[in-house]
């Protein structure tokens, strides 16, 4: 078994080592017909020319004409018509919204597998879907697949600085070489775009939300345009994070007050300049009046003033504005979890039609587990974008193996009860709950310059899963894991099943050894790695761990019930009552919503303190199991990747033990 470095990601095309499948694939795919021309079609052709000979271990003929044998036929609906393929109006309707189909058809000269889509980018995504079927050894005899994206804008958000560093990046430096652009194009940009396209992503926000004005300078826009040109045929639109005070820094204006005509004009001109260089520019993602970033409130204006001014400029050219709701001004409320709703709920209905307010999955900050953000379900007239963090800032960074799809599914499937039962977060994000036309999901990227892209080979699963869920949030975390494992590690059941078990248990384990039962933000200050539950020396009260757990001799937890901060009131009934009552609050959120006595009995029959001890240890035990499982997989995995993961699991185990010991020791002092 030869060494692998992980650069190929899940796009590994190894000879199909199932003899029956291989024979069938070879028989079914003797020819490939791609009637279309142009850049995206070239990418599709190149991918198939690269993949099929490797998967089938045989040369495959390519044509632009009607095939004369069993064949794969690939094109947009219009392109397929030139080959005489008929698409019924019913099928056409289903294809709308950038969807695709993959289906088996009987043709004059044999059997065809036809890949068709609403636009070339959809065909590209479908091509990757088809290759995935081969990579995972699926039956392709009677295909009838129809798929369309549930969310319109599916963006990878990079927190990359212009100097090449990455905020909360754990996989090396930024992929974007700003100094070399636009003259020099790193071939890796293509591989990045190809990976994004393979999972159906269609947007990339290039720079950190903690922005620098320079990213909007003409010099940098030309560099951005070079990336946009390169990404376009892969179906990726480029977005930027602008600095709200750029009119002053770049434009030399005396103010950045959004109500000033000169400021609005500056933005209109800047946006026009961008669209001249990048006609399909996606829009802006803005962090304003958050953690020290400038914003409209600096001038006594509000979020809607700032957002609308920018949105008006963008809307003229078809761009959208993502306005982040990650705000926690302690003068708004002493419970940080309540701040965003208190600021944004009164603004509902006041935003321009091309604004999406973007909320993180939970109301604090990408913790190992949070209840869903109560803005979902509370803003009815404003489309809400969901922001997830793929880079595992608070979940062991690139040193721990934690599969995040289960967490994201918990959020997406959570019922907000905004319009009665069934108004899940997913439906709100999709737009269907309140009838919004625009929809967006953004994942904070975990990729960087490291050879394997994500630092940890297993972190690739989270990039993959984000894309797959962004395309179709009805997929299960388990199904996504199955695909990813087969493509990344092989189809042998001896490999697939144990690795899936590891993935599936990894997030609950991390929650357990870090912050079980609704605990949150017990990480060390600044870098957020490792435990420090006693931390109490930050200038800001809500940057201290003790603020979040409030442990004392009477018990532990943040009282957000009606008797406490009343954050529960931001949720719709019946959730608000359920969360409010310690007897009905789901135990996974118990200490999020309640301050609970140490001897409080839990469902297991154990007291709270006993349960905490049990869960911390459970978390550690699962990491031990992962490490053992991985050890047993050694004969099936190439030595290089095996060693890489082995070392990280050993470190994860050490760190999980530290979490367990430090937290139990610290909290134990109060139990007596
Ligand atoms: C926090 C990160 C910080 C980000 C901030 C944000 O610690 O680096 O700038 O979120 O989302 O999680 O703006």
Image: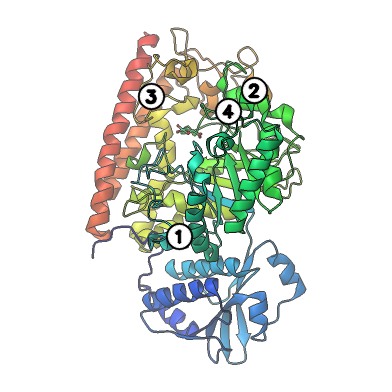
Task: Tell which tag, 3 or 2, sits nearer the viewer.
Answer: 3
Task: Tell which tag, 4 or 3, sits nearer the viewer.
Answer: 4
Disc on the earlier residue, 2 or 4: 4
What residue is shown with label 3?
A: 525
What residue is shown with label 4?
A: 289
Tell me residue 595's x, y (percent): 53, 15
Is residue 489 visible in this depiction of the protein? yes
Q: What residue is shown at x 66% (from left), y 75% (from top)?
A: 77
Camera-nearest residue between 118 and 100 = 118
Depicted 642 relative to depicted 578: above or below: below
Disc on the earlier residue, 4 or 1: 1
Task: Tell which tag, 4 or 1, sits nearer the viewer.
Answer: 4
Disc on the earlier residue, 2 or 1: 1
What residue is shown with label 1?
A: 195
Label 4 to label 3: alpha-carbon separation: 22 Å
Label 2 to label 4: alpha-carbon separation: 25 Å
Camera-nearest residue between 600 and 90 = 90
Q: What residue is shown at x 52% (from left), y 53% (from top)?
A: 467
């Amino acid at each position: 078994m030869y060494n692998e470095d992980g650069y190929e990601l899940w796009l590994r095309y190894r000879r199909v080592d199932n003899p029956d499948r291989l024979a069938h694939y070879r028989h079914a795919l003797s020819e490939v017909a791609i009637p279309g021309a142009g850049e995206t079609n070239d990418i599709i052709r190149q991918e198939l020319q690269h993949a099929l000979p490797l998967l089938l271990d045989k040369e495959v003929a390519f044509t632009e004409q009607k095939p004369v044998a069993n064949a794969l036929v690939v094109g947009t609906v219009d392109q397929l018509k030139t080959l005489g393929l008929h698409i019924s109006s019913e099928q056409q309707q289903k294809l709308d919204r950038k969807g695709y189909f993959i289906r088996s058809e009987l043709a004059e000269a044999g059997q065809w597998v036809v890949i068709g889509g609403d636009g070339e980018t959809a065909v590209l995504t479908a091509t990757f879907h088809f290759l995935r079927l081969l990579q995972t050894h699926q039956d392709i005899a009677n295909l009838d697949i129809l798929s369309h994206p549930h969310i319109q804008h599916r963006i990878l958000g990079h927190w990359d600085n212009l100097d090449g560093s990455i905020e909360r990046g754990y996989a090396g430096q930024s992929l974007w070489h700003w100094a070399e652009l636009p003259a020099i194009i790193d071939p890796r940009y293509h591989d990045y775009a190809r990976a994004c396209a393979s999972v159906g992503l269609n947007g990339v926000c290039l720079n950190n939300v903690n922005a620098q004005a320079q990213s909007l300078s003409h010099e940098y826009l030309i560099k951005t345009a070079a990336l946009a040109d390169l990404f376009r045929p892969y179906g990726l639109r480029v977005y930027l994070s602008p600095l709200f005070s750029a009119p002053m820094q770049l434009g030399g204006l005396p103010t950045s007050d959004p109500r000033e005509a000169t400021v609005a004009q500056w933005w209109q001109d800047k946006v026009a300049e961008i669209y001249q260089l990048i006609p399909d520019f996606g829009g802006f993602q803005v962090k304003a009046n958050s953690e020290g970033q400038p914003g409209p409130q600096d001038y006594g204006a509000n979020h809607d003033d700032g957002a609308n001014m920018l949105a008006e400029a963008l809307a003229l050219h078809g761009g959208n504005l993502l306005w982040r709701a990650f705000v926690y001004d302690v003068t708004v409320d002493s419970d940080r979890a309540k701040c965003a709703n208190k600021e944004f709920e009164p603004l509902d209905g006041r935003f321009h039609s091309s604004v999406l307010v973007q909320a993180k999955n939970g109301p604090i900050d990408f913790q190992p587990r949070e209840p869903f953000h109560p803005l979902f379900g509370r803003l009815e007239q404003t489309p809400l974008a969901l922001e997830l963090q793929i880079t595992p800032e608070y979940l062991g960074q690139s040193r721990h193996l934690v599969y995040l799809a289960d967490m994201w599914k918990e959020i997406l499937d959570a019922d907000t009860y905004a319009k009665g039962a069934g108004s899940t977060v997913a439906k709100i994000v999709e737009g269907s709950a309140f009838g919004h036309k625009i929809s967006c999901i953004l994942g904070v990227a975990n990729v960087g310059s490291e050879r394997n892209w994500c630092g940890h080979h297993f972190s690739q699963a989270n990039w993959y899963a984000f894309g797959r869920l962004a395309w179709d949030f009805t997929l299960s975390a388990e199904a996504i894991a199955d695909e990813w494992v087969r493509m990344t590690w092989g189809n042998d059941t001896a490999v697939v099943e144990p690795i899936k078990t590891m993935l599936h248990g990894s997030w609950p384990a991390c929650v357990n050894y870090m912050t079980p039962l609704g605990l949150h933000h017990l990480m060390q200050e600044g870098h957020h790695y490792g435990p420090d539950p006693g931390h109490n020396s930050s200038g800001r009260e809500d940057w201290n761990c003790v603020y979040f757990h409030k442990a004392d001799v009477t018990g532990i937890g943040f009282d957000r019930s009606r008797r406490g901060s009343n954050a529960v009131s931001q949720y719709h009934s019946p959730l608000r009552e359920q969360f409010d009552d310690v007897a009905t609050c789901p135990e996974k959120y118990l200490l999020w919503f309640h301050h609970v006595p140490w001897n409080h009995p839990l469902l297991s029959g154990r007291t709270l303190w006993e349960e905490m001890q049990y869960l911390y240890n459970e978390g550690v035990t699962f990491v031990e199991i992962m490490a053992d499982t991985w050890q047993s997989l050694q004969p099936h995995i190439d030595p290089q990747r095996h060693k890489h993961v082995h070392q990280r699991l050993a470190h994860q185990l050490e760190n999980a033990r530290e979490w367990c010991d430090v937290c139990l020791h610290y909290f134990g002092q109060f139990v007596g």
